[in-house]
């Protein structure tokens, strides 16, 4: 049995993916019993996470928490960071933070996809199967993750920032996006979250805001550095358009959204399913959750019906 971070494990893993190690010899430490798949080797796992950051904006904004083997709860600290002025006596009351810690239930939502490759590529020395699979899995997983981190309901998916329960708080309610209510959304977020705040919206909403002006013709969007009120804008096309009932703009500190990774990305080969097509299938799995641990840290605009 090889250690999951060893070069022997990496070699045996890719031999298995190329059908040179049909018994998965030496890979038992990386085996995920529920899916009968195997953890990506350490070097490719780092490449996978880097590729995920290119596909999913939350991977660069959110806090990443590794919680393998957790009992479905993790502790969070929701402190208000209070200090106390003290007198000369010994009976002064401190804010001790005892009640700041709370348990947060987490789940291992399973995300999976399958990639098919023609058999000829497996023997082609010019074909980099490692890079192809890592990039292909990251592209599919990243986009699906991003949609869940925005729109997920917390049942079979992570809880997204727009979820009615557990999502971001509503900062502004309006019938249409205006210069004034964008500013109102900004100031609806507490200063402690504004200083690291980021605007999130889709392309269509961003286009509308790029042309939005006040009564004196001043643009709200800084076209020099793509900021609004000094804070950066990130495009996430999982965000909805500014239609009735939607929440098209979010602003706040996205580090209070936690991506909880339960198991390292795993994969396995499927040789027989596509044999008649002279293809080989590769199944990839993630087990993770996502939650906004402090809903007041991000506020949204709600478009009324």
Image (cartoon, rainbow, N blue to C red):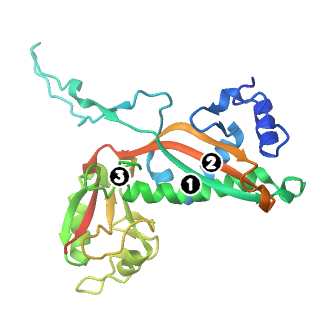
- Answer with mark 1 or mark 3, whichever residue precedes in sequence: 1
SS at mark 3 in the image: loop
Q: Residue at x 32, y 43 (%)?
A: 293
Q: Would you identify the image quadrant in which residue 173 lies?
A: bottom left
**CB-based contact (under 8 Å), mark 1 and mark 2:** yes
> Rounded to the nearest whole Å, what is the CA distance between mark 1 and mark 3?
24 Å
Mark 3 lies on residue: 253
| Circle 2 or circle 3, nearest the eye | 2
| Circle 1 or circle 2, nearest the eye | 2
Left or right for 20, reference 288: right
Count of numbered tags: 3
> Rounded to the nearest whole Å, what is the CA distance between mark 1 and mark 2?
9 Å
Q: Residue at x 32, y 62 (%)?
A: 250
Q: Up-down: is 54 above or below 259? A: below
Q: Which mark is residue 284?
A: 2
Q: Up-down: is 64 above or below 252? A: above
Q: Would you identify the image quadrant in which residue 32 lies?
A: top right
Mark 1 lies on residue: 141
Choose between 283 and 142: the one closer to the eye: 283
Q: Which mark is residue 67?
A: none
């Amino acid at each position: 049995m090889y250690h999951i971070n060893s070069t022997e494990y990496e070699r045996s893993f890719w031999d298995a993916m190329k059908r040179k190690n049909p018994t998965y010899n030496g890979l038992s430490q990386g085996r995920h019993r529920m899916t009968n798949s195997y953890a990506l080797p350490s070097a490719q796992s780092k490449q996978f996470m880097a590729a995920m950051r290119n596909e999913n904006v939350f991977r660069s904004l959110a806090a990443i928490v590794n919680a393998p083997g957790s009992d479905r709860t993790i502790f969070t600290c929701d402190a208000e960071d209070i200090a106390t002025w003290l007198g000369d006596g010994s009976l002064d009351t401190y804010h001790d933070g005892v009640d700041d810690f709370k348990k947060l239930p987490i789940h291992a939502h399973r995300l999976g996809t399958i990639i098919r490759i023609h058999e000829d590529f497996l023997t082609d020395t010019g074909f980099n199967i490692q890079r192809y699979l890592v990039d292909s899995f990251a592209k599919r997983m990243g986009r699906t993750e991003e949609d869940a981190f925005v729109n997920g309901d917390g049942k079979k998916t992570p809880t997204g920032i727009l979820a009615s329960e557990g999502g971001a708080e509503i900062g502004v309610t309006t019938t249409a996006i205006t210069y004034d209510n964008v500013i109102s959304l900004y100031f609806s977020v507490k200063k402690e979250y504004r200083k690291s705040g980021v605007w999130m919206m889709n392309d269509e909403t961003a286009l509308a805001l790029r042309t939005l002006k006040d009564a004196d013709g001043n643009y709200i969007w800084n076209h020099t550095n793509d900021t609004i009120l000094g804070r950066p804008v990130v495009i996430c096309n999982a965000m909805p358009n500014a239609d009735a009932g939607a929440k098209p703009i979010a602003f706040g500190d996205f580090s209070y959204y936690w991506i909880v990774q339960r198991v390292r990305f795993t994969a396995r080969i499927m040789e027989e399913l596509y044999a008649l097509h002279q293809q080989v299938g590769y199944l990839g799995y993630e087990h993770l959750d996502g939650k906004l641990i402090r809903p007041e840290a991000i506020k949204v605009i709600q478009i009324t019906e």
